[in-house]
Amino acid sequence: MTFSLNTILLILLGLLTAILAPLGISSKFQLDVLTLIFFTAYIGQSWNILGGYAGQFSFGGVMFFGTGAYTSSILLTSFGVPPIIGIFAAIFMGAFLGLIVGYLSFRSGLRGSYFALITLAFAELLRVLANSVEFTGGGVGLFLTYAPGLHNLQFNSPTGFYYFSLVLLVISLVIAMWLERSRFGAQLVAIRENEDAAEALGIDTLKCKIYAIMIMGGMGGAAGTFYAQKYLYIDPPISYSIALSVEMLLVTIVGGMGTVFGPLVGSFFLHIVNEFARHFIDTPGVSLIVYGFILILIISFLPNGLVGLFHRARKKKDDNDA
Amino acid sequence: MFSEVVSLLPAGIINGLMFGAIYALVALGLTLIYGVLHIINFAHGAMLMLAMYMAYFLFKILNIDPYVAILIVTPAGFVFGYTIYRWGIGKLSGGRDQNILLITLGLSIILENSALVFFTGDQQTISLSYSYEAFDLGFLYLSYPKVISFVASLVICLLLWMLMTLTDLGKAIRAVAKQREGARLVGIDVEHVFAVTFGIGVACLGAAGCMLLPIFYVDPYTGNIFVIVAFTIVVLGGMGSIVGALLGGFIIGITESVGGLILGESLGQVGISLIFILILIFRPTGIFGSKV
């Protein structure tokens, strides 16, 4: 995809709006909701790189998030390393975990559902381990102290975290745009469409898939640090929650797999659905029931997600105009 | 420490066998569906949870013993499974295996959260008049419910095996599993057989749910505990193998129980995920890699 002038203008306009938004939004709650939307879009994008572009669905994407959260938090609590350095360690550990998981599972030829399930098993394994060993704080979890400051990646107003999430989001969008234009991205798409054919064309599919899962891992690692510094507490069920693994694939599939803006669109859409559902019936679980139906409907009828719907509408319009 | 563990070992193994039989039943449904339809039913755990709730309410409201409720919940499971495949999953899937995985994931989210909305998140347990009576084996007290569940699971596995090998329906299912186009050509209604197989798979869960209830608890997330376990058994035994599921169930049951004994309750669970990962990496066809 090459970007037309209109698209570029639209993106710049969106970015400007996002940067100026805190000036117009006085409610802390609304700013927090936006932060959450950006964060979910960011972590969805990490899933999108391996799942959307390379076609390798993971059900345990949360493992990178949790590992990153533990990495920077342990560095901070046990060794006094400030999170602004810790976040890079978290990115490194996430990518490293991606290397291990990717090497082990892709080398033995796991594809499709098998790959999805083995990532789930890895996430579960890490959750049980984090629960059992000493240095993670075990089942008690890790408490971080509140000391706002850039070096701690903590902020004394929601605006700070809003910009933090915006920076992460923009980085993830840039990575996805780069994928769309780069040789590496094209190789990933080739693997998604037909892995044997890609192999026959001389693409080192193993290496490409491992690079993709490492990018996903690094992005997930940074997300873990973000979460830990924002909420100041992590434990094994939070760090390796199946719910987050599901959420990252959900926003991406709903928005549009293998598209730059799919995860962001999906994240906005599902949060709006969530608010609506809560408005009518305020019982825990109701919005998730709706999510389940949306997932099934999108898979069955809109394989390219909401972004795909948008493209289809625009194409129809272009055809009519011509 | 070591001698202590050794002295506890027989008890651990027998306890593992008891749970293993129920695990096998859960895995049997999963492996049957995989072997014939070549799809992974991610909603398996959520369906097990529903079966347990059904048995729970039959006991609470109508005072029906869970072991008697098997006769009600198992057919109900079949009808549920048949319906949801014939007019749901089968229609929507469009053929890609990842799509089915995601559709059944969506289904499990719906079932779990519906249970949360209607039954609340509280853990429910039941106690039967004979819950605390036990056989005394000298080194171990074995409660009646565990023994009954063990025997009943084996009987159901045997019945299923007979169904698959001795009846015309079993023959048709095996034919569809081996060659679905060929089966269609000789006049087998393949879509019907798919739905029947899915129904039988869910029926296994109905029986397993009734047998789990007296010795476990149920809440909307109970199924999750058994999903990884069931997948592990299925890959261990070889996708689609009935005998494999049975043996795999016992192996996992014993591993969990003995592992818990040696490593402690929480670390014992590591064993299951670890076995799953190792088997997938080194021997994805499983140990008994024969098809149904």
Image (spheres, rainbow, N blue to C red):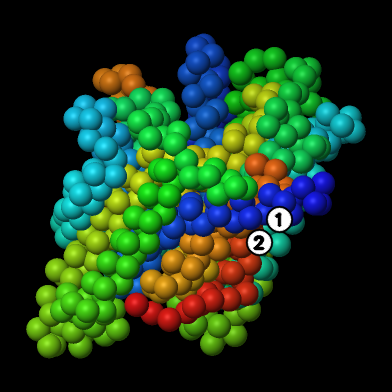
Type of amino acid under label 2: Val
Quarter of the image where the C terminus of chain B is located: bottom left
On whether disc 2 and disc 1 are found on a single subunit, the reply is yes
Identity, as a three-letter code, of the amino acid under mark 1: Leu
In front: A12, or B113? B113
Q: Is residue B46 left or right of residue B244?
A: left
Q: Is residue A46 above or below residue A115?
A: above
| Residue nearer the viewer, A110 or A162 | A110
Label 2 with label 1: CB-CB less than 8 Å: yes
Give whichever of A111, B142 is nearer the camera: B142
Q: How many marks?
A: 2
Question: According to the image, label 2 marks what residue?
Answer: A101
The residue beneath circle 1 is A97
Q: Is residue A52 left or right of residue B89?
A: right
Asked which quadrant contains residue B278, the reply is bottom right
Residue at image x 14%, y 68%? B192
Picture residue at 50% right of the left edge, 66% below the top: B248
Residue B141 place in picture, x, y as percent? 54, 43
